[in-house]
Image (cartoon, helix red, strand yellow):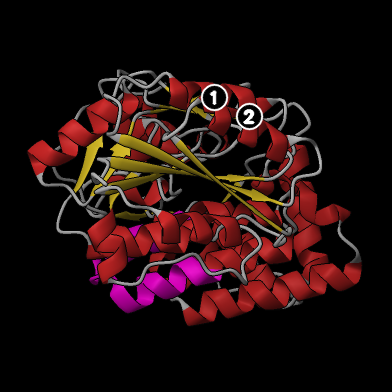
Amino acid sequence: MPVPDVTVVVAVYNTVPYLTACLDSLVGQSLAPGRLEVVAVDDGSTDGGGELLDAYAARHPGLFTVVHQPNSGGPAGPTNRGLELARGRYVLFLGADDWLGEEALERLVTAADAWGSDVVVPKQVGVNGRLVPQGIFHADAESVGFADSALAWALADTKLFRLDLVRRHGLRRDERLKVFSDQPFTLEACLRAARVSVLADYDCYFLVLRDDRGNVTERAGVLDRLRGIAALQQVAAELASPVEELDAIRVRSFAWDVPRLLDEGFLLLAEETQGRVCAEVAGLVERFGAREVYHRLPVAERVRLELAAAGRPEALRNQIRYEAAHGEPPAVRDGRRLYADYPAFRDAGTGLPDELFLLREETAGAAEAVAPSPGLARQLWRGLVPAQLRRGLRRHPAWRRFADSVSGDVR
């Protein structure tokens, strides 16, 4: 039997009515017959999704392989099962509520073959309000890395992977993770790849936010998310090169993934859960060197991380409420230094160091911003990271000054 160019793995669990658009996009691919196979794994669907898969397989013999299994509790199990059955030279993972552009697979395979890529990041588009950072898609790129691009902000497994790379390194999703199991997988693949490329000149992959917000990530609990973040950072600690590569991945988690779990949603958690969250964040901060990239984070994010790490949920709640009500705090001058006057600043009860609140320091007549770094600022303002984070950063005076200087890039 000929080896197909690409295997698309689709893990399916209760995604009707979105599943039809997903499957139709695969049937309609421009790849010639025999160059594509689809392995769809029904993870115990109860909404008729399994029967829909069987119907498509019957209508399109030779294209679909359908596997039915009891529900595993998360996407990692059915994704791994599909990966085991993959025969293509390349494999692409497609969400069962997402869909592909008609020429997506043909273009991706052509690019991977031409460039010798182990991983190709396809142009992705958000549907129904789905947030998809766009900065890495500003142009086609034959080779990108974590230190010179926004790759750290694009760690979902919505990519084309060379199957030989996956098999050679035994890459699989961790089935103990209920959410974010794709990110450690993708990070390890990218760190082990000889070449990671970007195909940006065609809308390949359409990521859908379900009307009921039923996407796995949307419904995941905060503790499950923190475990996924820890797994990602463990891969980085083991495989990423210091300093720039490792720091880029650290910044991803500690400027965005962890702080977003310490926002207004934190206030809705039971006090016992808040305490557990703080303990988990403390472990992340200590184990994975978060403080080494604090100089690249906005003050508010640093403060929330440290209040959690210090086991101060009450002070953290006050910080969150203050940010929601007031946004940016007034600045306090002490000699040549300016500090953000958040409630925890010089509060003996929290004991946080002044440096955590430092906005800028004046030396030799010049005002030098302490955070954020120009390189990260440039990425953020060009849209390389999520829009919610950019909106929050606009309150920070250092970010506003940078935005004024690169107004043509701000969006």
Residue visible at 54% across and 64% down in the picture: 229
Looking at the picture, tell me which residue is in the foreground, 195 or 334: 195
Magenta-colored stretch includes residue 251: yes
Above or below, 150 against 221 in this view is above
Q: What residue lies at 16% left-to-right and 52% top-to-bottom?
A: 195
Question: Can you tell which quarter of the image residue 40 is in?
Answer: top right
Q: Position of residue 22 (x, y in %)?
A: 55, 27
State the residue in front, 278 or 159.
Answer: 159
User: Residue 61, can we see it?
Assistant: yes
Q: Position of residue 30 (x, y in %)?
A: 31, 19
Q: Magenta part of the protein: which range?
A: 230-252
Q: Secondary structure at mark 1?
A: helix
Q: Is residue 378 visible?
A: no
Q: Are marks 2 and 1 in contact (CB under 8 Å)?
A: yes
x, y percent for residue 313: 79, 69
> Whole-percent x and y of residue 365?
27, 48
Residue at the spot of label 2: 55
SS category of the residue bearing label 2: helix
Is the residue 372 above or below the residue 179 in the image? above
| Secondary structure mainly formed by the magenta segment | helix
Q: Amino acid at mark 2?
A: Ala
Give the vertical position of 95 relative to 27 (above or below).
below
